[in-house]
Image (tube, helix red, strand yellow):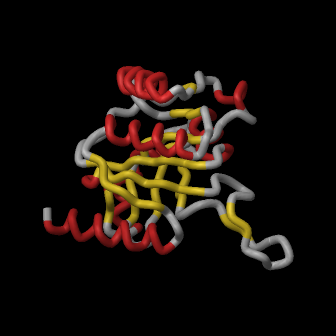
Amino acid sequence: MKGEQHAKEKFKKMAETVQAVVSDAKDLREVFAHAAELTASRNATTIAAAGFADEDTKLLKTICDDKGLRLLEPPFRNHLEEIHTSLTPADCAIAETGTIVLDSAAEDMRIATMLSEIHVACVPASRIKANAMEAAEFLDGRLKSAPCYTAFITGASRTADIERVLTIGVHGPQELHILITEENIAKEDQP
């Protein structure tokens, strides 16, 4: 438990270093409420959620309805210009770099994490690994099964390609919010 707490604190520090906003959440209800409140506070109206079990998506829909938000229905290819906030579970996190790791084999997961203005991700504290070697062990089985597309996300999208001027949000979300949960998250079955 002490190692888990140390990894969690290091992860928070490193993720905040790359301008991610990191918070704690007791459970998915708090994660969903946070995403809905964040979306509403930006005067936006849409959330795209990928990777959650059906029963959890129903809870998110109820929370969105209560806030006057629209939970976009997959396939997200039909909503490319509408996605404001995306909400995804992370498979694990790497404390030494502040990185979240997502199984992105599903197109909806890739669209949600690349085309939203704000990406809200949640990861259980028990899945925060101290370093890349621990994460490699965790991902070994996933990387052997096809098709495999794994995303490593560290902070919001940034580039300095244009005349060496740092620009946020060109190749992905402008903001990354990470909520660390106390409980594990049931994920949908991947195709």
| Residue 87 visible to an observer of this rendering | yes
Find residue 148 and report its horizontal and vertical position in percent: 55, 43
Find residue 143 and report its horizontal and vertical position in percent: 48, 48
Q: Nearer the viewer, residue 57 or 36?
A: 36
**Residue extending furthest left?**
1
Residue in view at x 46 percent, y 48 percent: 121
Residue in view at x 63 percent, y 40 percent: 84
Q: Nearer the viewer, residue 62 or 18?
A: 62
Residue in view at x 72 percent, y 56 percent: 171
Q: Is residue 162 above or below residue 120?
A: below
Find residue 95 and report its horizontal and vertical position in percent: 37, 68
Give the quadrant of residue 74.
Answer: top right
Q: Describe residue 2's horizontal placement relative to residue 16 as left or right.
A: left
Total labels: the figure holds: 0
Find residue 170 and report its horizontal and vertical position in percent: 74, 58
The N terminus: image quadrant: bottom left
Residue in view at x 35 percent, y 58 percent: 137
**Residue extending furthest right?**
163
Q: Describe residue 73's horizontal placement relative to residue 11 as left or right.
A: right
Q: Nearer the viewer, residue 134 or 128?
A: 128
Q: Describe residue 116's horizontal placement relative to residue 4 as left or right.
A: right
| Residue 143 visible to an observer of this rendering | no
Q: Is residue 45 above or below residue 20?
A: above
Give the quadrant of residue 175.
Answer: bottom right
